[in-house]
Image (tube, grey):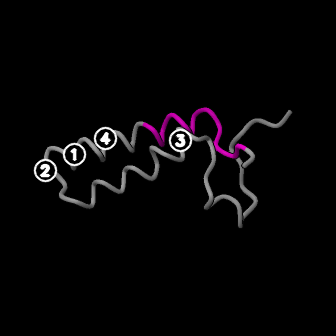
Amino acid sequence: MKANVGGLDRIARIAAGLVLIGLAATGTVGVWGWIGVVPLATGSLGWCPAYLPFGLSTCKTK
């Protein structure tokens, strides 16, 4: 697994995931808010499987 999620993208994914999970935990958005686990995981790991087929990467090139 080569990292394909860069700095700002990681921060945005983690923040969005935490917000969705928090809203789901409080009952504000219902069970669909638990989908926030996906951006939280991809942001934490720095790897997104959806980027692979398109050859995308938000990591800085060396």
Question: How many other residues sit within 10 Å of disc 2, few (<14), some (14-19) or many (≥20)?
Answer: few
Above or below, 22 against 56 in this view is above
User: Residue 32 at x, y = what percent?
Assistant: 27, 61
Above or below, 7 against 29 in this view is above
Above or below, 32 against 48 in this view is below
Rounded to the nearest angstrom, the CA distance separating label 1 from label 2 is 6 Å
Q: Are marks 1 and 2 in contact (CB under 8 Å)?
A: no
Q: Which residue is mark 3?
A: 43
At a point 57% along the width and 34% down the height, the residue shown is 8
Rounded to the nearest angstrom, the CA distance separating label 4 from label 1 is 6 Å
Marked residue nearer the N-terminal end (2 or 4) = 4
Rounded to the nearest angstrom, the CA distance separating label 3 from label 1 is 19 Å
Q: Which residue is mark 2?
A: 27
Image quadrant where residue 7 sits: top right
- Which quadrant: the C terminus? top right
Label at residue 19: 4
At a point 51% along the width and 34% down the height, the residue shown is 11
Q: Secondary structure under badge 3?
A: helix
Q: Residue furthest left?
A: 27
Q: Are marks 3 and 1 in contact (CB under 8 Å)?
A: no
Residue 5 on the magenta segment: yes
